[in-house]
Image (cartoon, grey):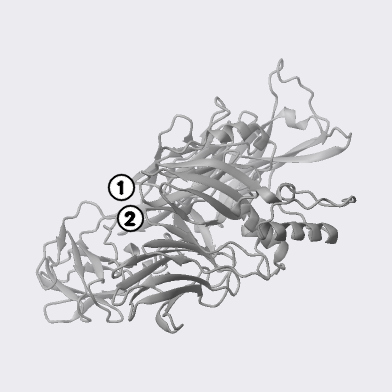
């Protein structure tokens, strides 16, 4: 059943009055559910004001309710004593409501305080942790402080597998997190127990899926009955759920798993799975009995966003998947090690010995051959090394790592080598693929591309949800990774009834980051978030633009986390283009000599001490703003009805120039107009209002002189 997000229409007018900011999810607990069940999911994040809907990709998931939990106020001593006594009674199973004292002056209000006996499990968990755990400022993170509770109903025929889940607030769409639908029974670590009580240890029946969170210094435990000589596997998703944490080192949850036998002796341990920080553990029970699986962070850290999901099943660990690489049009040949091959070809093989695999190919003098390994980028174990030998065994070319765009959640994409080899003479050449550490085995699969130069590229749109002002624009960044020396211009194509690219629709040649502006008319003011696709084409190659969100890891490193869908949404951001725009859209400006760009601002913003300023947003170092009239003020300026009179315009000008370093460079430049004016409130006080409008992007070229 397709998820409807029509409820957000009710809240669009209210949202228009709110300051807009990106809704950000930091965690979702649990991160999945079994089909045919209902689940309450707790979201932690920020900018949750106005959240009124939830989106889950795919069919078979229905959102039954969304609750934004406002900050719980700190009660004074008397109120706290009353609340704790009431909750302890409820915890003991006594539903009787304790009478309120006669004097409740100064008591703080919250909806949870009014319905202690009617709280859901998720609501009770939030309240219990607030009241019974002493706050530690070192553990508190504003990025995950907000709370939203969403109740989902999973259809019995919902397709199992990975989904994408987002929150929606008045047209704003959050970043996505991963959410899973399973067929096995789901268990979770126990809810918080009021001290001095201790939570029970869940007993699970395998196959099962285990869900939980690791709090500071905490170790979670699950017990299970094992049969002698039976093999069991536990495969964790922890970092995978939230791959990049900005305010923590190493920037992700580093999970550890261990199994204890009935006597408490450790019989199995895992803290990773090949190069993947998420552990996978397989063991064979030496005797029948009750065993314990223990889960914790490697450094005994913990926080609400240390969420995990562990798949437990009988049997050996499943082999890594062997996904196809993102190269089209090449024939695939399997298990060709030790043979001669004709290129272009894509070889699929496995490293079975430390010496690796060798292949022979023929090349003509001066012929360029591209050799490329796909392994780590596909989630496969080899950390490959490429070497090319002539017929005498002399190494002619070699490569281990290649710098790459930090896109995707795999941290070792640069480990896949690339060699651009030019044959010095006609003859037979040998290429060898091996693991840098000599690792080998049936799991060590890879692809080897032996090919001619194949210029191509990948384009990411950041963020994966762009908010566009009605009759205005929204901005996104197109991030490009170029392959095989492709350095050309890239054209962007968006076909949609309600949205279009306005301003420049190209990524300049040689540019790896380019701004793009989207436009939506105001014909339909109420519009749910729209899924869109953008096609990128250039040099005879085309591909779908990949939506993504930039995330920071460990205070320093920025990565693009890909998303399944790209959303364009309509919500109030600033003033419309019908009132502030380019006087004449310049399209492309070439700076062989200084040039002037001119914006126009309606006179309506100058009736009460109005002023406006035209600003270039983050220009490149080679683009210079020359002194000139970038700012206008018109105190007590023009009185106009705007309905009967032709709109009067004020002009804002910027003079642009390029220095020598900008030769043959180009940029999609963003400009904004900031208007400030006085507004008298109902209380008679005059307030200074500031509003910003982003203008359609202009392509600026540095010139060729």
Residue sitting at x 73%, y 51%: 96
Horizontal and vertical percent for residue 267?
39, 82
**For numbered disc 2, what is the local secondary structure?**
loop
Q: Answer whether residue 576 is visible to the viewer in this image.
A: no
Q: Is residue 415 above or below residue 502?
A: below
Dot 1: what SS? loop
- Between 310 and 26, the one lying in front of the other is 310
Residue 648: % across, % down: 70, 24
Q: Is residue 242 above or below residue 699?
A: below
Q: Where is residue 129 shown, x and y percent of the image?
A: 67, 62
Q: Left or right: 36 with respect to 584?
A: left
**Residue labelled with disc 1:** 539
Q: Are marks 1 and 2 in contact (CB under 8 Å)?
A: yes
- The residue located at (61%, 28%) in the rendering is 578
Q: Residue furthest top?
A: 644
Q: Is residue 502 left or right of residue 225?
A: right
**In the image, what residue occupies the spot 57% across and 38% down?**
171
Distance of label 1 from label 2 (alpha carbons): 8 Å
The answer, for residue 587, to whether it is visible in the render is yes
The residue singled out by tag 2 in the image is: 486
Q: Residue at x 65, y 29 (%)?
A: 579
- Judging depth in this view, the residue of 613 and 565 nearest the camera is 565
């Amino acid at each position: 059943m397709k998820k409807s997000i029509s409820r957000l229409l009710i809240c669009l007018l209210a949202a228009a009055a709110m300051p807009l900011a990106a809704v950000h999810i930091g965690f979702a607990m649990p991160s999945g559910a079994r089909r045919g069940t209902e689940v309450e999911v707790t979201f932690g994040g920020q900018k949750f004001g106005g959240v009124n809907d939830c989106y889950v990709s795919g069919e078979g998931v229905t959102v039954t309710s969304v609750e934004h939990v406002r900050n719980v106020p700190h009660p004074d001593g008397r109120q706290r004593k009353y609340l704790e006594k009431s909750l302890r009674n409820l915890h003991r199973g006594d539903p009787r409501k304790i009478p309120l004292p006669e004097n409740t002056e100064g008591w703080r209000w919250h909806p949870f305080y009014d319905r202690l006996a009617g709280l859901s499990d998720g609501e009770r968990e939030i309240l219990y942790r607030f009241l019974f755990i002493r706050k530690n400022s070192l553990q508190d993170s504003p990025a995950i402080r907000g709370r939203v509770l969403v109740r989902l109903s999973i259809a019995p025929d919902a397709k199992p597998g990975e989904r994408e889940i987002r929150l929606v607030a008045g047209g704003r769409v959050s970043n996505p997190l991963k959410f899973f639908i399973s067929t096995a029974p789901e268990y979770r670590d126990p809810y918080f127990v009021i001290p001095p009580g201790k939570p029970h240890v869940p007993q699970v029946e395998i196959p099962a899926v285990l869900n939980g969170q690791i709090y500071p210094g905490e170790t979670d435990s699950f017990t299970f009955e094992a049969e002698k000589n039976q093999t069991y596997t536990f495969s964790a998703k922890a970092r995978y759920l939230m791959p990049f944490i900005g305010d923590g080192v190493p920037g992700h949850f580093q999970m550890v798993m261990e199994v204890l036998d009935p006597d408490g002796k450790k019989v199995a341990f895992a803290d990773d799975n090949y190069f993947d920080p998420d552990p996978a553990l397989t063991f064979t029970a030496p005797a029948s009995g009750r065993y314990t699986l223990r889960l914790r962070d490697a450094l005994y850290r913990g926080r609400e966003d240390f969420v995990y999901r562990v798949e437990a099943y009988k049997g050996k660990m499943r082999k890594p998947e062997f996904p196809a690489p993102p190269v089209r049009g090449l024939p695939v040949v399997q298990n060709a090690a030790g043979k001669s091959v004709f290129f272009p070809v894509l070889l699929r093989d496995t490293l079975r010995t430390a010496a690796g695999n060798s292949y022979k190919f023929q090349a003509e003098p001066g012929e360029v051959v591209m050799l490329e390994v796909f392994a780590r980028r596909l989630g496969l174990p080899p950390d490959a090394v490429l070497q090319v030998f002539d017929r005498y065994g002399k190494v002619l070319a070699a490569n281990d790592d290649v710098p790459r765009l930090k896109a995707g959640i795999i941290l070792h994409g640069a480990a896949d080598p690339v060699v651009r080899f030019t044959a010095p003479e006609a003859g037979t050449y040998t290429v060898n693929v091996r693991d840098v550490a000599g690792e080998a085995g049936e799991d060590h699969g890879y692809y080897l591309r032996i090919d001619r130069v194949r210029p191509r590229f990948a384009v990411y749109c950041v963020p994966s949800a762009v908010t566009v002002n009605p009759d205005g624009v929204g901005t996104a960044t197109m991030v490009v990774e170029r392959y095989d020396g492709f350095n050309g211009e890239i054209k962007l194509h968006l076909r949609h009834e309600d949205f279009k690219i306005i301003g420049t629709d190209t990524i300049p040649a040689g540019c790896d980051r380019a701004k793009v502006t989207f436009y939506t008319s105001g014909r339909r003011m109420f519009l749910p978030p729209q899924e869109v696709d953008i096609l990128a084409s250039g040099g005879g190659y085309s591909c779908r633009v990949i939506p993504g969100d930039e995330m920071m890891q460990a205070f320093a490193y920025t990565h693009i986390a890909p998303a399944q869908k790209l959303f364009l949404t309509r919500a109030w951001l600033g003033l419309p283009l019908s009132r502030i725009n380019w006087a004449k859209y310049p399209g492309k400006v070439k700076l062989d000599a200084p040039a002037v760009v001119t914006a126009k601002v309606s006179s309506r913003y100058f009736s009460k001490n109005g002023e406006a300023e035209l600003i270039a947003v983050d220009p490149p170092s080679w683009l210079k703003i020359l002194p000139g009239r970038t700012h206008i003020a018109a105190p007590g300026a023009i009185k106009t009805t705007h309905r009967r009179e032709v709109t009067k315009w004020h002009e804002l000008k910027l003079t642009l120039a390029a220095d020598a370093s900008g030769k043959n460079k180009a940029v999609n430049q963003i400009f904004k107009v900031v208007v400030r004016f006085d507004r008298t409130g109902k209380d008679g006080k005059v307030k200074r209002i500031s509003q910003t409008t982003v203008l359609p992007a202009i392509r600026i070229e540095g010139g060729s002189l």
